[in-house]
Amino acid sequence: MPSHHEEEVLGKAYDSRLMKRLVGYLRPYKWQVAIALGSILLKACADVLGPYLTKVVIDKYLAPVPGLHTPLDFFLSNKPLLGIAQVAAIGVGLLAFSFLLDYLQTYFMQWAGQMVMFDLRSQIFRHLQRMHIGFYDKNPVGRLVTRVTTDVDALNEMFTSGVVSIFEDVFVLVGITAIMLNMTWRVSLITLAVLPVIAYATKIFRDRVRDSYRRIRVAIARINAYLHEHVSGMMVLQLFNREKRAYVKFSEVNEVHMDAYKDAIMAHAVYYPVVELLSATAIACVIWFGGSDVLHGMVTHGLSVTFSRKTLLHWQLVKNVTTLGILVAFIQYAQRFFRPIQDFSEKYNILQSAMASSERIFKLLDTPTEITAPEVIKVPQGPGRIEFDHVWFAYNARARGETGVPTRQAEQSYEAALHPTPDWVLRDVTFTIEPGETAAIVGHTGAGKTTIISLLMRFYDVQKGAITIDGVDVKDMDLADLRRRFGVVLQDPFLFTGTVESNIRLGTDWISDADVEKAAEDVNLSDFIQTLPNGFKEEVRERGSTLSTGQKQLISFARALAHNPKILILDEATSSVDTETEFRVREALIRMVQGRTSVVIAHRLSTVQRADKIIVMHKSRLREIGTHQELLAQRGIYWKLYQLQYKDQEISSIRTLQVTANADD
C-alpha cells in the first residue's frame, strides 16, 4: 500500500524545461564547463584516429596499394621502417594527448558538479529554513532529507558522468560514422544494418529496467521508512515482544527490493550479450563482404601488373574499393562503434533518474514561503505589550483578508464558503498582556493554547483579526527581529550535537562565557555542570541522549535566559520533569520572569497560581480571564479544572498513605 514516505514514479528521461533550469546552475562555472566540453570533443577526435593510423600502416607499408594517397603523406617517409615508426610516434602522441584531455574533462566536470551540488544543497537548506512550520506538518523529515542528499547526488551523477559520457559517445559515433562512410559506403551500410535490431532490443531493455528501477526506489523508500520508525521505537518494540513480527514484516519489504533488483540484473544479463551478439554478427559480415572486396581488389591488382598500365589506371580511379587496411580499420571501428550504443542505455537510466530528482527538487524550491517579511518593516518601540484583537485561526484555511467581526450566521456562511471547511482552532480571541505581566494560559487539550504561541511568533498567520506587539502588527515586523524578542522553553526540550555551552549560546556571538555561566546559575544548573568532567565543554550527543529530561529542560531554560529576551514563553515547561527538578525550575522561573512579559502554558494549575493574569481557553474560545482568586470566585471553567486537579491530587495522596501504611504493617 503506498505511503507518503515513498518516492514518486520516475518521469520522462528528458525534459527540456528542467534541463534548461539545471544548466542555469552551471553558468557561474561556464569556463570550467567549456574546457571540459572542449576536451571531450578533442578526445573523441583523438580516439577515432587510432584505427585510421592502422589503415595507413597496412595500405602504405605492409600491403602497399599502388597510387594510394593519405593526408599523412606529407609527414611520412616512403621507407617502410621509418614510416611505421613515424605512424607509431603519432599514435603514442595521440594516446598521451587523449590522457591529458581525459584528465582535463574529468577534473573540471567533477569540480563543476561538486560546486553545483554545493549551491543546490545550500539553496534547498536555505529554502527549508524559510518555510513555515505548517509545511513540516505535511512533509516527512525523511523525504526532505532525501531531497538534500540522494536527489542532489543523482544530479551530480548526471553532470559528471551522464551528460559528459553522452556528449563523448555522440562525438565518437559521429566521427566513426563519417570516417567509415568516407572509406567505403558499401561496407559501412553492412555495419549499420544491425542498428534497427539493436534499437528494438534497447527499447525493450529500457522499459524493463525503468520499471525495475522504479520498484527499487519505492522499495528503498519503504525500507528507510520502516527502519526509521522501528529503530526509533525500539524500546516499545522490545517491551511488547514484537521483534519477530517486525522482522517478518521487514523481510517482506526487503524481499520486494531484492526481487526488483533481480529483474534489473536479468535485464542487464540479457541485453548486453544480445548487443555483443549483434555487434559480432556485424563484424562477421564486414569480414565476409569486406574480405571478398579485398580479394577481388587483389585479383584486379594482379591483372593490372600482368597486362597493362591502363588496368592500373582503372584501379586507381575505382572508388570505394576495399583494401586490407580498410578492412582491418573497419573491424576496429565496428568494435568501437557498438560500445557507445551499449553505454546509452546506462546513461538513459542516469538521465531519467536525474530528471525525476530535479523535478522533485524544483517542486520543493518552488513551494512558496507563506510566512514572509513585509516590504515596509516596522520596529515596535516598547517593553513588550502583547495584544490579540479578535483573532480567528484554522490550520486548514488560508487568510482571505476580510476585516470585521462575523456574526454567528456570518461565521457559518464563511465556514461553508471555504473549501475545505475550516476547523477553527481559535474563534474571536481577544486579550491583552501588559508589559512585565505574567500571563498563564490554561485549558483542556486541544483548546488552542499552543496555537496562541505559534501565532504570536508568526509560525502561522491568522485568518482574521490581528496580533500586535507594542502596537505593531506582527505581520509588519521583520521575522528575525520578531523572534529575537522571545525566549522560548518548550515541553520537549531539543538539544543539538555539540557541547553544553554551545547549546546554551546556540551560535549567538554576543553571548559571552560569563553570560552563559550567569544563565546557568540563575536556572539552578550550575550544580549539575560542576559534576560533569568537562564542565560547560561536556559533549552533548544527538538530541541530548546522554542527559535526563530534567537536565535537558534546565539547559533549555538557561538558553532562553542567556539570550535576554523581552518576552518569555514557557510551553508546558515543567510537565515532563520530576518533582525535585520542578521545584528547582520554579525557583528559576521566579528570577526569569522578573522585569519581563511572560506567557506560561501549563496543565498543572499549581504552577500558574501566582500569575498576574490567567486566560482560560475552552473549545477554541476565550471563556474566562482574571487572577487565580477571581476565577475561583466565578466558579466557572477554571474552578472546575481546579477542583478536578485538587481531587486527583487528594486521591493520589490518600493512595500513597495507604501504600505506606501497608508497607509498615
Image (tube, helix red, strand yellow):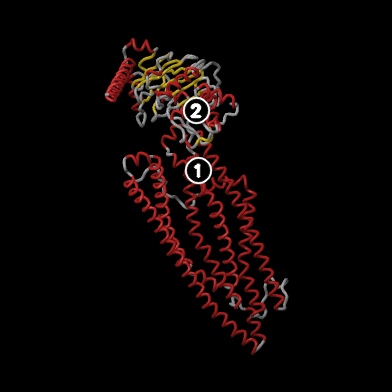
Camera-near label (1 vs 2) is 2
Tag 2 secondary structure: helix
From mark 1 to mark 2, how far is it between C-alphas? Answer: 38 Å
**In the image, farthest residue toward the front:** 665
Locate the C terminus by quadrant: top left
Count of labels in the image? 2
| Residue depicted at x 62% and y 44% | 28
| Residue depicted at x 58% and y 61% | 171
| Residue depicted at x 32% and y 47% | 244
**Residue 630 percent coordinates (x, y):** 37, 10
In the visual, does 590 lie left or right of 415? right
Q: Are marks 1 and 2 in contact (CB under 8 Å)?
A: no
Q: Nearer the viewer, residue 506 or 32?
A: 506
Q: Which mark is residue 148?
A: 1
Residue 477 visible at all: no
Q: Is 97 rendered above or below residue 248?
A: below
Mark 1 or mark 2: whose residue is earlier in sequence: 1
Q: Kindly identify the amino acid type of the residue bearing the numbered disc 1.
A: Val
**Residue 547 percent coordinates (x, y):** 46, 33
**Residue 465 percent coordinates (x, y):** 43, 20
Q: Nearer the viewer, residue 254 or 174?
A: 254
Badge 1 local density, few (<14 within 10 Å), some, or many (20+)? some
Q: Is 522 rendered above or below residue 278?
A: above
Q: Nearer the viewer, residue 241 or 139?
A: 241
The residue indicated by pointer 2 is 528
Tag 1 secondary structure: helix
Q: Kindly identify the amino acid type of the residue bearing the numbered disc 2.
A: Phe
